[in-house]
Amino acid sequence: MSVEGAARIVRELTSRGYNADRETVAMIADSERPAAVLERVLRETPEDALVIRPELVRSARAAVDRAGDGTGGDGRSDRSSDGSERRLGPMPDSGSAPEDPSVSTGTDPERPSDGGGGSPVETKGSEPPDVDGEDRRETESESRVADRETVERETVERGDREVEIAGDMTGASTGTGEYRDFVAVFRDRLDRLGSKLKGRVNHRPASAIGSMPGGSEAGMVGLVNDVRSTASGHWLIELEDATGTFPWLVMKDREYAGLVDELLFDEVLAMEGTLADDAGIAFVDSMYFPDVPRTHEPSTADRPVQAALVSDVHVGSREFMGEAWDAFADWLHTDAAKRVEYLLIAGDMVEGVGVYPGQDEELDIVDIYDQYEAFNERLKGVPGDLEIVMIPGNHDAVRLAEPQPGFDEELRGIMSAHDPRIVSNPATVTVEGVSVLMYHGRSLDEVIAELPAEKASYDEPHKAMYQLLKKRHVAPQFGGHTRLAPEEKDHLLMEEVPDVFHTGHVHKLGFGKYHGVLAINSGCWQSQTDFQKRNNIQPDAGFAPIVDLDTLDVTVQKFS
Ligand code: D5M
Ligand code: FE
Ligand code: ZN
């Protein structure tokens, strides 16, 4: 252990009011990546703790070793006002440029219109619960945390149940937070989403477009690098690919002008248009998003079976609605719920600690582990034969940067009631042939803040989800509020179209279909917090949307 390293760690700890014994400090200092371990320890130590617990350091070390925890960078890329920043520059050890002259089969070239929303249907949580309390079926206790590959699919069948997981990046984080990771993740994004667009335009690399004669027709596929309005009210959109950037001008009176307000930085687009005489800019004739094909037909289950989709339980908060949750758990034991065989929980199991300034004043349970114990007690109330799938959210004790790996061993040990399947945020779970993309929904705040209200609002969170489906990415924008960790692969893009897209986070209930995909934002189990009061946010608390997997119809059960 270097004395200097240990001293630095002690300084970091004491400046935050914590003590630690020599052994604990040594355990941090002697780890392979002391800074990452320290950061994790600080994040997971309750604010009111006095001493750093050695077992927490041990689990942080294990987690950092296992995950290669890429929290070093938060993805913030300072965008210079002249848009000259380059993210796709040469990679020291990456192969060829993504530009591929072969044309992929284009999907539907049409642009989408709104996918027809739906407003919540409320039904009163029925009959007095006939609780039998006993587990209706033994669950297997096979370990599910074996080292997984991101792309590996895992199918486990228990009786009639079918659960398959894809895209779980737990234990597969490659990020080191270094510059090369940003290059890699953007290249991967452009390659994989770009290939969905290349059949639609006669695309050329940015560098080649710059040397074409004025008046030529040109097409390009790239990442949105900058969006600016010009003095005369037109829009200048700079697209970037592996060869450089090129500016595209959307005239204010063209039909595409109406789409400019829904663009986010770093999403992938295709443009087609005519080069100006001096060839330094192109006038946009058409614009394409990766999108969900209009002809998309979702898969459905071949028997009448249902899934309950919930999120944002927030156990440990003073506002956690324990009675409503227990009523839900009881209802699941009744005949009315006998077809509900799956329970999906999209993050924020607990309230967490140190998530927002002043949060400690609203805590009912101050220790994060105690919060998970209490959550597990609530989970025990649901029938034992439910298949449960859970991902973490921004209040949970995993790294904040997305993609968020599934909970570590220690937390899995605590949340063991009914042997839930614990995967990363995001991940895709296929139940009875219906693929459900589960994502906590942190980026929804950003989509709602940046887009006009008719395209995305807290009152209609499913419409914000439509935008993510259209962009085929759960969190396109780097450098905003959503913390993103660069990885070799972009785990946040939607390579495949899901049948159901399930998010939470904004504590609002809303659902609707977009090109056949059912988008559901589940509400929460936390009544209005002080923050929400101050900001006039009315949460939809105590509702459970239930999806018929054979029809993708939704009914909402109310428990508050
Ligand atoms: O997020 C619940 C919703 O409320 C989500 O839209 C963010 C917003 N929220 C809640 N508290 C805060 C504070 N203090 N600052 C900014 N935004 C906030 P959840 O992740 O459940 O807290
Ligand atoms: Fe939440
Ligand atoms: Zn949240």
Image (cartoon, rainbow, N blue to C red):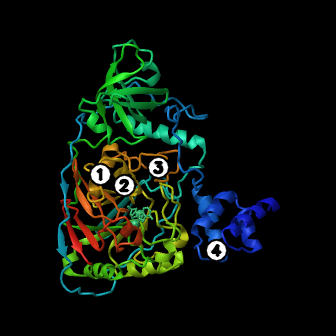
The percent position of residue 482, horizontal first and vertical second, equals: 46, 53
**Do labels 2 and 1 touch, CB within 8 Å?**
yes
In the drawing, does residue 154 fall left or right of residue 136?
Answer: right
**Do labels 3 and 2 touch, CB within 8 Å?**
no
How far is the residue under mark 2 from the one under mark 1? 9 Å
User: What secondary structure is marked by label 3?
Assistant: loop
The percent position of residue 71, horizontal first and vertical second, equals: 57, 54
Q: Residues within 10 Å of mark 2 (few under 14, many from 20)?
A: many
User: What secondary structure is marked by label 1?
Assistant: loop
- Residue under the point 27% across and 87% down: 131
* Foreground of the two, 152 or 458: 458
Question: Mark 3 vs mark 4: which is more N-terminal?
Answer: 4
In the drawing, does residue 95 fall left or right of residue 264?
Answer: right
Where residue 480 is drawn, which disc sits there? Answer: 3
Question: Mark 3 vs mark 1: which is more N-terminal?
Answer: 1
Give the residue pinned by disc 4. 55
User: What secondary structure is marked by label 4?
Assistant: helix
Q: Is mark 3 within 8 Å of ligand 1?
A: no
Quarter occupied by residue 545: bottom left
Q: Residues within 10 Å of mark 1 (few under 14, many from 20)?
A: many
**Residue 198 visible in the current orientation:** no
